[in-house]
Every structure is written in C-alpha cells, then in structure tokens.
Amino acid sequence: MKLYFVAFVLAHSRHKFTVWLDRPFTTRDTIACHEKAFQFYGGITDEIVYDQDNLIAVSENAGDLILTKEFQQYIKDRKFKIYLCRKADPESKGKIESVVKYVKYNFAKNRIYTTLEDWNERSLKWLERTGNYKVHNTTKKTFRSVSPGKATLKKVSTPLPILESNHTEIITRNVNKDNTVRYTSNRYSVPLGTYTNYPVVQIVPQGQKLKILAPHTGEILAEHTISLEKGKLIKNLNHGRDRSKSLDELQRNVLTLFPYDGAEQYIQDVCHTYGRYRRDQLLLFQKIAKENPEWLSAAIHKCIQEKLYSANEFRDVVAYFKRTNIEPEQPITTVKESKESLAIAVQTRDLKEYIQRMGGK
C-alpha cells in the first residue's frame, strides 16, 4: 500500500506532527493539514519554513515568490510569513528532512496497514509515546523541556471558508508526447493533439472513474475507469482518431488526393459499405495516398476490376504493386468466336469404354 504524508516540526523544540493520505496530496489537502497542525500545536507561528513543493510554490522568481493561487490566499487569510528553502540546501531544510526520514524508518517500516483512519491514529500515538517523548539526538532534550509554550503562538481563528466548501480533488499532470497521462502507475489516453494543445491537464478521480480536463476551460477531454493494476495502458480507441475535421471535409480532402477516373465513385462506395467506420476508412485512404502516390491510379482500377471495396484491400493491392514493381494487368479483351472454330469436328468416344475402365458391366 503506497501512502503519502506531510510532516511539521517546530524548529526550536523539535515537536513533530504528521498527517497521512492514501493518495497524492493536493494544495487543498496541504492547507487542511496546516489547520490540523495549528490545532495540534495550539496556535500559529509567525513564520513557516518550507522544503520546495509544487503544491505550495510555482517559482522562486529571484526572491519574489510565486505561490499557487489557493496557498497564496491561505497565507493571506492566516497572516504568517513564508520562507522557501533553496534546492540542494541541507542547512536550511535538514530539520524537516530528518523528520521525514525518522517517521518513515521508525514508524512506517514493518507496520501493518488496515485503514487510513487507524494509521493516522497510530501515528499520533507513536509521536506521543516515542517521536515526541524521547530525547532528541541533536538537542539532547525532549520537546517539553524546551517548548516555548502556547503563549508565543498566535491563536487559531475559526475555520476558513476555503475548507468548508465542497471540493473535488484536482491533480495536475503533464501530457506525454504519445498523448497519455500518468496516474497511479498507469497511463491513460487522451485525444490526438492534446499534447500540443494542452501540455498540462487536470485529473479528477471520482470513485471508480477518472476524468481528464482542460486546465482553463474545464472541458472533459477523456474519461476512463480507474485500473487497479500497474504498468497498464488504458486506451480509448477513439483517441487515436483525428476528429478535428468533419467527415464531409475529410472526404473532400481525401478525394483531392485521388484525381483519377472512377476514384470518387469507388471511395464513396467504400464509405457506404463501411458506414460506421467511414472515418477510419478515409484516414487509411489518406495515409496510403501520402505514402505511395505513384501506385494509386493502378490500384484504383485493379480494385474496381476485382470488386475489392475496402481501404484495407486497397492497401494490400498497393503493397503488391510496390513489392512486385509491375504495372497492373490490363483488362482482358473478349476474343470473338470465329465460324471456322465452330466447324471443327470433335472426336467422341463410346460410353462403354468409360464404364469398362470403372469396372462396371
């Protein structure tokens, strides 16, 4: 079971607090955990130091920090200062990194997971009897002996409206070049062209369903059933089709690639035969025309002659001409029967000879 947690620690007393989730954190989850931490400590500190995290900060911007929209509003409401650690700076974020390592290898390791509520409850009990009770290796003191007390912390006001409103979990993900999005060790397909139009999308898990949305408009780009397996590609076959053009426009574009006698009627007959798969047939014709333009005329006449009304069969004919590098056979001319050939006498045998050879009487 893969679990995630956020850790807090008071810099002077080393008083620790953790909250666990069974899914990746969102910005709103992080804010809710701050509220729990303030209740746990009995107040808010003047300043909070953060290890860099994209749920909190977008960019350092040469000191003019750019925070995520929700977290910017949160610190404005709670009125505390923020200090963002530099990358690869163990001196500034060593305290919290040590807490994370301490919790992972002293609490989480070798414990049996049942439910998230039980896990969080056991985590708090462990902090009470061990994590916050034992003498700290660096300070050689317990948090109680050095705790500044609640008097130095600002009082927590009433719960914020941002946490009381209904909220659906939204996760941001980058779109891969193959038009897929990663979620819980699987890849989920999005429509062709999403990588170009929306390099970053929003993921909204709702029960067993996973919705993938356009970031600004909220348009639903794809919807899948969440897979419980790992390393799988969950793909909607429609996502591999170019739907940016209408069928009629696509057919007109394909016909411009086939300026040959009989081609228009042939392609229309194929579309009529494969009504449900008209788009797929046209896209296949388009692909063949762009890859092998020199064989189109010969293949059209051959398919009409042999009554092969399918884009796949058309592709096979083109492949045959290309492989053999020969021109298609010319239509066979019917030979007129002459009167001389009709006058030729044909030798016949008596039926008894055949009966005798078959052993009959």
Image (spheres, rainbow, N blue to C red):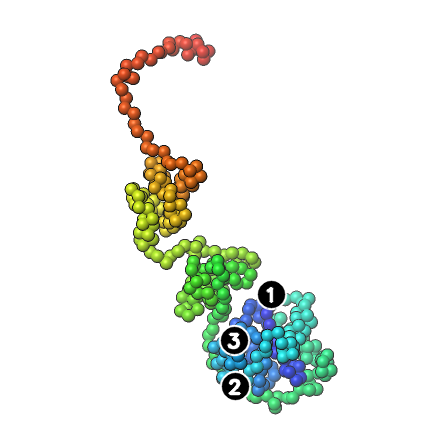
Question: In the rendered picture of this protein, how many numbered marks are placed on residues?
Answer: 3
Considering the image in quadrants, where does the N terminus appear?
A: bottom right
Considering the image in quadrants, where does the C terminus appear?
A: top left
Q: CA distance from mark 3 to mark 2?
A: 21 Å
Amino acid at pointer 3: Ser
Q: Which residue is under mark 2?
A: 79
Q: Residue at x 52, y 62 (%)?
A: 182
Is residue 71 visible from the viewing direction of this image? no
**Quarter-wise, where is residue 331 in the image?**
top left
**Quarter-wise, where is residue 99 in the image?**
bottom right
Amino acid at pointer 2: Lys
Please indicate whether residue 47 sits to the left or right of residue 210 in the image: right
Camera-side mark, 3 or 2:
3
Q: Are marks 1 and 2 in contact (CB under 8 Å)?
A: no
Q: Provide residue 100's location: percent of width, then percent of height.
A: 64, 73
Please indicate whether residue 241 sits to the left or right of residue 102 in the image: left
**Quarter-wise, where is residue 219 in the image?**
bottom left
Q: Quick one: label 3 or label 2, which is nearer the N terminus?
A: 3
> Which SS class for mark 3?
strand
Q: CA distance from mark 1 to mark 2?
A: 34 Å
Circle 3 residues within 10 Å: few <14, some 14–19, many ≥20: some
Q: Which residue is under mark 3?
A: 59
Q: Residue at x 35, y 36 (%)?
A: 306
